Image (cartoon, grey):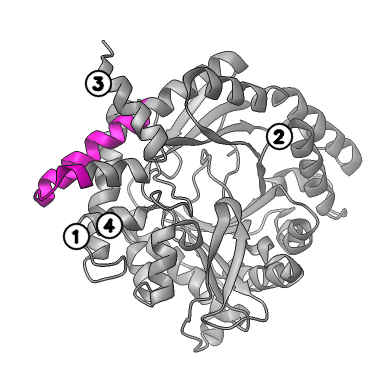
Amino acid sequence: MINSHDILETITMIDDEHLDVRTITMGISLLDCADSDINKACDKIYDKICRYAANLVKTGEAISTEYGIPIIHKRIAVTPIAMIAAASPTKNPVKFAQTLERAAQTVGVNFIGGYSALVHKGFAPGDYALIQSIPEALSVTEHVCSSVNIGSTKAGINMDAVAMMGKIVRKTAEQTADQECIGAAKLVVFCNAPEDNPFMAGAFHGPGEPDCVINVGVSGPGVVRAALAKAGNCNITEVADIVKKTAFKVTRMGQLVAQEASRRLCVPFGIIDLSLAPTPAIGDSVAHILEEMGLEQCGAYGTTAALALLNDAVKKGGVMASSHVGGLSGAFIPVTEDAGMIAAARSGTLTMEKLEAMTAVCSVGLDMIVIPGDTSAEVISGIIADEAAIGMVNSKTTAVRVIPAIGKKAGEELNFGGLLGEGPVMPINQKSPAKFIHRGGRIPAPLQSLKN
């Protein structure tokens, strides 16, 4: 039975504490669109996306209006395009990106993800060409997002792909230097990439997924912070319990939206992603949750422990609220997208080294971090390798989304606008790992991969 207290509490969460459904993401398989004729393949891709997602935006807006729940983004994730490009190996894959862009504009979604390749154990036909085309693809499109999975706990880390991605990240930033290097903000390098992630820029529709599915990502950092503020001076066990109960409430709202969207679109419901996804808005910050726990500023000693508590409690509360939890699920720490993280980075309290430590216990990884524009491709590859190692050894998803600010130095700023936010160029260790990176080969899978 829903009582008046529950209703008033939810209204407060939405009006004052930035509670929202961050995204309804429709996953669409394009495996049946592959064709040796790239023009035919692109026509099939465009037709299928437009057919399946024709009512996605309208449905999301209708649910938002009827239930009073803000639904910020409507998105699409598709089969990794490298798999489709393999059928037409002599053609430039950028044509696929342009087709995705055209489809995204037609149906009106905010982003479309899946200009992706899975190369954790090596390169299959289509992979190499797609990866090389990423800088051009992201420079000529607005809504397309790209990701590359270069490692996994089962396979190890493909160091040839790591070396390649350092160059690709840098080149992508260079080709969009006149747009605040935004291309690199739409590119994620993964270890243990999930097949059902609804969040951009890393979303793609995995080969193990159904033909079409609805996945929903919820968000509520402000709600969690407000709950802790109301609780006052309680002990750490009580803090964990408050976060867990709050995550349950947030997830139930997401479950309602997901099931309703599934019903109206006649598409199976996939998963709820529990991630606390911040925005640059004041009061909608993961960093401020950690500070509410008792840290003077995010990045101080104790930050990693507080984040571990938060991440675990969010998962425990969320899995009680939904039987189908997936995606990334935890607490995001994207620097430029979080007001508290931005402030901590500007003050120098939050450093690259502290962020790397935090990624050992939270979702995703080094996310939306602006680095000096003269950072070499090898240093970027070293960052990717380190983060992939954390994911591989800990059997968790980690990722790198760094933006080389071409022409800018540490202390200067980039401003992307919107959910991507703004932030300072953070100083990083520029000592070269080039010899290590250029050895190539594959870092073997860790012992814990042998679980059969």
Residue 440 against residue 225 in the figure, above or below: below
Residue 202 against residue 349 in the figure, above or below: above
Disc 3/disc 4 C-alpha distance (Å) = 27 Å
Q: Are marks 2 and 3 in contact (CB under 8 Å)?
A: no
**Quick one: which residue is furthest to the top in this view?**
1
Q: Earlier in the sequence, mark 2 or mark 1?
A: 2
Residue annotated with mark 3:
5
Viewport quadrant of the N terminus: top left
Viewport quadrant of the C terminus: top left
Q: Quadrant of residue 401?
A: bottom right
**Quick one: which residue is furthest to the bottom in this view?**
431
Residue annotated with mark 1:
294
Q: What's the residue type where badge 2 is placed? A: Leu
Residue annotated with mark 2:
31
The 10 Å Cα crowd at callout 2, few under 14, some 14 to 19, many 20 or more, is some
Give the magenta-colored segment's residue range.
229-252
